[in-house]
Image (spheres, rainbow, N blue to C red):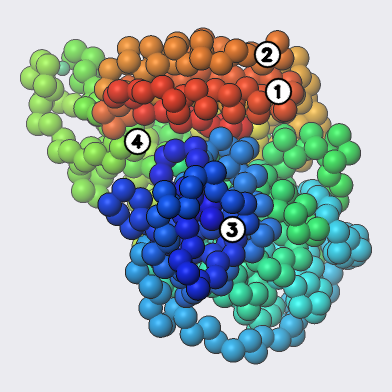
């Protein structure tokens, strides 16, 4: 039989079956490779090996502690392996929860699946609006076949309610529904809503922050078909689901659906492929769909269902305006209109949210006398000053160091903290509004998941007057009493050279703006900027995503960027930049690129050094997906054959980040 193993080689390994044992494709086995035992998955138990039987090792053990991996799942793995140019062995083994990769048998705790007593009883919270009803009915019509639906609903339009009603239909038929969400921080509230709606259903929660055993149990419950609802982050798309009947990708535009290491898959794209395999609908929900999905809708591949209004009675979309930083002086980052708006909410006992997309106290510690600034030894980036521990943190590699007493180059003791992050904004607000309860939410304050859940619940109950936060606070949360959002500065994104910057900025601003006025009280949003005339703000103010998406598409088309071309990046890192560059230069000559495939010159990353490695990449583009795939396959085959001393490389297909 042919076995997939977790080794970085583009091949499978042949083993013999011991007398009397029976094995089928999809079985987990223990086999020996070199001197060590490995966990493998049988990919092909039928085709005879080309090697003589006496030259094959026999498998050590057939593992029966977890269900056999179904053919459809193996098919998904084959697709991911081919599409993302990663050896099948690495793909298959990495898709298993860690406990199933290990050689140790599963503990009994994980094995004893509870009896399947789940019931499909559904307790809806709301009577659906006309728009929601239409969406539910339209999608429910397609429950027995593949269909990709873009559920384009403004913030607060009740997309979750639509998902719940669809899931109810799926559970009624005995099917499984897979719901993918971007962040773990989102799941507590969402999990609560699911449990309330389906008090007797079996729900499997899947994300990487779960303990090993909990994760394995959830996986087994999903793989055995016991769990009716599978709610998780991107990795949940890799679970075997024998009765899969619906996939929902909530906030489908979110970049966290793309894995940034190992198998660099997009869970959203994998979800669409999976739905095809399973013959079921996939619902991509967002207020600001990705341009890729928008393009697919425009091409007629996806059906778009729109929810243009907020669902809660009386709730309107917020009024969005800009504050011109050229005419309103900012003091400690705040202009008068924003401070007034906050004061106003405090007086009315409503909540405000101050959004700044940078954590820490100050992003630069500098010496004004000589121009020195605190940089990370391992990275090109600057160190960020953090107030709580009074230390310098590298946000790229995690290094932490003490604040120098004096400038290391000129001895000046008066070092200055420049710019601001969430901690400094919190400090400024505390001085300005001493009686207000200020809650800061970012990755530093949210280290412990339980704590974040409690904080978020507190905010929902009205604890906290001013919230300060990064994107983490923008996502999905429903804070009934929040009526004002102030965005301190959005301009860095407007000046970015990344062609996705505008798309992302629009998404994050509309998401953070979407936290305001989700009930009867109208919401107001003020965005401080030096470029109030930028078309992005006009679109944001008129809630015209469609118009904005069309203008971005036109730009991408004329510039030759995705979704009009397909892209991949070949990246290399080495201790010396020249080595990485030389590797890429050579890679360029290895496989002949057909006319439709364009291979650009290698260039160093914008942030060249990271955690001690110098990084460079070359971009490969083609208007033809097939031509690109064929070229990448040829290229990877060559790369696996050439020895590269001191260089690590990987391919990123459909890359989202370039530094
Ligand atoms: P979205 O995910 O589209 O941003 P949510 O599903 O979170 O929106 O819904 C926003 C708010 O509207 C929630 O508080 C939800 O309970 C409420 N809601 C949803 N549907 C309805 C409805 N049909 N009637 C009244 N309120 C609703
Ligand atoms: Zn100095
Ligand atoms: Zn660093």
CA gap, disc 1 and disc 2: 7 Å
Task: Locate residue 538, reporting x and y percent.
Answer: 73, 30
Q: Earlier in the sequence, mark 4 or mark 2?
A: 4
Quickly name the residue at label 1.
627
Callout 2: few (<14), some (14-19), or many (20+) C-alpha neighbours within 10 Å?
few
Quickly name the residue at label 2.
594
Task: Locate residue 376, reporting x and y percent.
Answer: 24, 29
Q: Is there CB contact under 8 Å for labels 4 and 2?
A: no
Q: Residue at x 51, y 10 (%)?
A: 589
Quickly name the residue at label 3.
45
Judge whether residue 261 can be spotted in this image.
Answer: no
Q: Earlier in the sequence, mark 2 or mark 3?
A: 3
Q: Residue at x 33, y 58 (%)?
A: 37
Q: Is mark 4 within 8 Å of ligand 3?
A: yes
CA gap, disc 3 and disc 1: 32 Å
CA gap, disc 1 and disc 4: 35 Å
Relative horizontal placement of residue 150, taking residue 566 as reference (left or right): right
CA gap, disc 4 and disc 3: 45 Å
SS category of the residue bearing label 2: loop
């Amino acid at each position: 039989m042919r076995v997939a193993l977790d080794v970085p080689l583009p091949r499978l390994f042949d083993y013999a079956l011991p007398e009397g044992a029976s094995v089928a494709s999809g079985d987990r086995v223990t086999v020996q490779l070199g001197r060590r035992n490995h966990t493998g998955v049988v990919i092909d138990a039928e085709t005879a090996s080309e090697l003589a039987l006496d030259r094959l090792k026999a498998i050590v053990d057939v593992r029966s502690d977890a269900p056999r991996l179904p053919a459809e799942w193996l098919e998904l793995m084959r697709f991911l392996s081919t599409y993302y140019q990663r050896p099948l062995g690495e793909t298959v083994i990495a898709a298993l929860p860690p406990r199933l990769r290990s050689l140790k048998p599963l503990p009994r705790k994980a094995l004893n699946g509870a009896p399947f007593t789940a019931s499909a009883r559904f307790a809806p919270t709301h009577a659906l609006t006309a728009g929601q009803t239409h969406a539910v009915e339209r999608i429910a019509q397609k429950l027995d076949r593949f269909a990709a639906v873009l559920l384009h609903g403004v913030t607060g339009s009740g997309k979750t309610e639509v998902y719940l009603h669809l899931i109810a239909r799926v559970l009624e038929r005995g099917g499984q529904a897979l719901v993918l969400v971007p962040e773990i921080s989102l799941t507590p509230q969402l999990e609560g809503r699911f449990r309330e709606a389906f008090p007797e259903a079996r729900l499997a929660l899947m994300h990487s922050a779960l303990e090993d055993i909990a994760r394995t149990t959830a996986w087994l419950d999903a793989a055995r078909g016991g769990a009716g609802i599978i709610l998780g982050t991107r990795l949940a798309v890799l679970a075997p689901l024998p009765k899969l009947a619906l996939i929902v990708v909530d906030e489908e535009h979110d970049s966290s659906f793309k894995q940034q290491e190992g198998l660099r898959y997009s869970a959203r794209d994998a979800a669409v492929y999976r739905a095809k395999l399973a013959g079921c609908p996939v619902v991509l929900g967002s207020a600001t769909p990705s341009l890729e999905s928008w393009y697919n809708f425009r091409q007629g591949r996806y059906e778009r269902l729109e929810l243009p209004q907020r669902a809660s009675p009386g709730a309107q979309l917020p009024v969005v305006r800009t504050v011109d930083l050229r005419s309103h002086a900012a003091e400690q980052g705040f202009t008068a209109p924003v401070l007034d708006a906050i004061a106003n909410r405090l007086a009315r006992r409503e909540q405000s949210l101050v959004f700044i997309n940078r954590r820490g106290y100050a992003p630069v510690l500098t010496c004004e006398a000589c121009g020195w600034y605190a940089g990370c030894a391992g990275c090109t980036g600057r160190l960020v000053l953090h107030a709580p521990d009074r230390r310098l943190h590298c946000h790229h590699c995690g290094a932490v160091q003490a604040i120098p007493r004096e400038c290391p180059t000129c001895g000046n003791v008066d070092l200055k903290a420049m710019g601001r992050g969430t901690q400094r904004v919190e400090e400024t607000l505390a001085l300005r509004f001493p009686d207000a309860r200020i809650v800061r939410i970012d990755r530093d304050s949210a280290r412990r998941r339980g704590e974040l859940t409690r904080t978020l619940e507190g905010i929902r109950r009205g604890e906290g007057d001013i919230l300060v936060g990064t994107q983490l606070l923008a996502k999905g949360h429903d804070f009934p009493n929040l009526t004002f959002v102030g965005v301190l500065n959005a301009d860095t994104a407007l000046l970015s050279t990344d062609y996705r910057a505008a798309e992302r900025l629009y998404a994050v601003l509309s998401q953070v703006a979407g936290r305001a006025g989700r009930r009867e009280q109208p919401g107001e949003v003020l965005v401080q900027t030096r470029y109030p005339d930028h078309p992005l703000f006009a679109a944001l103010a008129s809630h015209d995503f469609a118009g904005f998406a069309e203008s971005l598409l036109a730009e991408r088309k004329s510039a030759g960027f995705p979704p009009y071309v397909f892209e991949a990046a070949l990246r290399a890192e080495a201790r010396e930049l020249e080595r990485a560059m030389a590797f890429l230069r050579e890679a360029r000559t290895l496989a002949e690129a057909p006319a439709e495939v364009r291979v650009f010159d290698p260039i160093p990353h914008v942030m060249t050094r990271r955690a001690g490695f110098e990084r460079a990449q070359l971009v490969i583009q083609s208007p033809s997906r097939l031509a690109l795939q064929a070229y990448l396959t040829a290229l990877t085959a060559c790369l696996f054959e050439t020895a590269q001393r001191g260089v690590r490389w990987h391919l990123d297909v459909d890359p989202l980040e370039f530094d």
